[in-house]
Amino acid sequence: MVAVDTNVLVRFLVDDDPDQSRAARALFASEAVWIPKTVILETNWVLCSLFGLTDVEVARALSRLLSVENVQIEDSTAVGDALALVERGMELADALHLLSRPRDARFVSFDKQLVRRARRAGADRVEELR
């Protein structure tokens, strides 16, 4: 198994550098690949900030990785659920923060918009801290 850095995942998804993209595709085709949650989060930032993709476009691309047989994503259930929340209006970072909590924990934030978006997206036990 090989764990990949953000730049490898971005090259695999975007194909913006012919040599590096070819190497990334070959790696994904030949090895078991481990992707940490932090790489998922940073990849989202890179693709939105530098490549101009929307959060939803990135979430859809990353969601496809969840079903690739030789790809393992750290905490894949939370990541998959977070990507689904992005489809319903949350930002990925906020969704990952929320879904990485212990199941019996409430999630509190001073960010009123985060709380509103989380509730609209169907998340439970999310509260504004006052």
Image (tube, grey):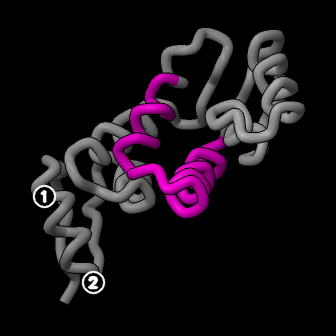
* Residue at the image point whose x is 49% and y is 15% from the top: 67
Q: Is disc 1 surrounded by few (<14), some (14 to 19) or many (20+) residues within 10 Å? A: some
Q: Is residue 20 magenta?
A: no
Residue 88: horizontal and vertical position, in percent?
Answer: 20, 46
Question: Is the N terminus in the top left, top right, bottom left or bottom right quadrant?
Answer: top right
Residue 101: tell me if it is visible.
no
Which region shows up in magenta? 36-64
Q: Secondary structure at mark 1?
A: helix
Residue 107: tell me if it is visible.
yes
Mark before the other along the chain sequence, 2 or 1: 2
Q: Amino acid at mark 1?
A: Arg
Residue 123: horizontal and vertical position, in percent?
Answer: 19, 50
* Residue at the image point whose x is 18% and y is 71% from the top: 127
Q: Is residue 52 magenta?
A: yes
Q: Is residue 67 left or right of residue 11?
A: left
Mark 1 sits on what residue? Answer: 119
* Residue at the image point whose x is 29% and y is 76% from the top: 109
Residue 51: horizontal and vertical position, in percent?
Answer: 57, 53
Question: Is the C terminus in the top left, top right, bottom left or bottom right quadrant?
Answer: bottom left
Marker count (numbered): 2
User: In terms of secondary structure, what is the magenta stretch mainly?
Assistant: helix
Residue 75: horizontal and vertical position, in percent?
Answer: 53, 36
Q: Is residue 111 left or right of residue 72?
A: left
Q: Is residue 70 left or right of residue 95?
A: right
Q: Amino acid at mark 2?
A: Phe
Mark 2 sits on what residue? Answer: 110
Q: Is residue 60 above or below residue 64?
A: below
Disc 2 versus disc 1: distance between alpha carbons?
A: 14 Å
